[in-house]
Amino acid sequence: MELESILYLFTSVSIGAIIVEIFKPTKSKNIQLLLTFSGAYLLAVSVIHLIPELFRNTPSDKIGIFILVGFLIQILLEYFSKGIEHGHFHKQKVIPITVLISLCLHALLEGIPLGGGLEHNHSAHNALLTGIVLHKAPVSIVLFSLFLQSGMKKTKAYFLLLLFALMTPLGVYSGHLFTELANYLNEIMAIVIGIFLHISTTILFESTDGHKFSLQKVITIIVGSFLAILSL
């Protein structure tokens, strides 16, 4: 299960790089629609699957605090990442190292529950994995495009993208290696859900022009939400 999950995670980032190489996208409507779809899926799968599952397994009424902590952590990470997670696309000559560090921390945290005991709950595991995979592809498109448009050499751009791609599998491996993390699986999962809630809601509102939803984006949101329902 872990090797299969890692393969999916690597593939999603690889697809992002391939799309950039072939189509050379900029901040286009297609990228925004991909992000909107992933945001809708993340929000729906969090609300109808991950959160109910978490509270069913956790009698503590304090688990909501960890969801809030995850929400606040993502706000802090996005301060350094400049909002790449939800499609902000600011062409610049120098990419701050804080952008990559914050994205890598974000990706690392996402992977820990996948290897920290959640693999025994196939339904929750698959829902979380699918959400991460769907989100990593468009984020990889934006990140790799920024690398190339900054004038960075392709070898360095691919190396940094590989570093980003390794972070979530590293989180999976860390969750599996450090077995004591399983004792805090619910708390870690709550933090990840908080991160998902912030990313998904920000994507859905910031990916619109003037905060107005076009029919195309409304349909995209409905499709993403419907697929999350089907994944139950």
Image (spheres, rainbow, N blue to C red):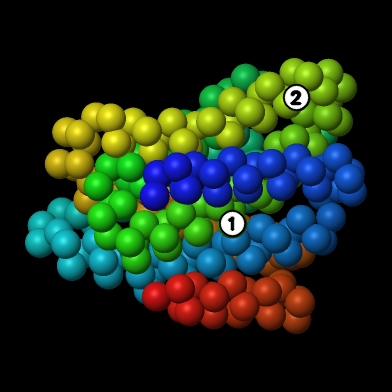
Q: Mark 1 sits on what residue?
A: 134
Q: Position of residue 175 (x, y in %)?
A: 30, 36
Residue pictured at 74% horizontal, 59% vertical: 32
Quarter-of-image position of residue 180:
top left
Q: Tell me if label 1 and label 2 are in contact, CB under 8 Å.
A: no
Crowd class of label 1 (few under 14; some 14 to 19; many from 20; radius 10 Å): many
Amino acid type of disc 1? Leu
Ranked by sequence position, the earlier of labels 1 and 2 is: 1
Is 84 situated left or right of 115 in this image?
right
Q: Position of residue 171 (x, y in %)?
A: 40, 35
Residue pictured at 66% horizontal, 58% vertical: 35
Quarter-of-image position of residue 215:
bottom right
- Label at residue 154: none
Residue pictured at 29% horizontal, 36% vertical: 176
Image quadrant where one finds the C terminus: bottom left
Q: Could you say which is closer to the camera, residue 117 or residue 66?
A: 117
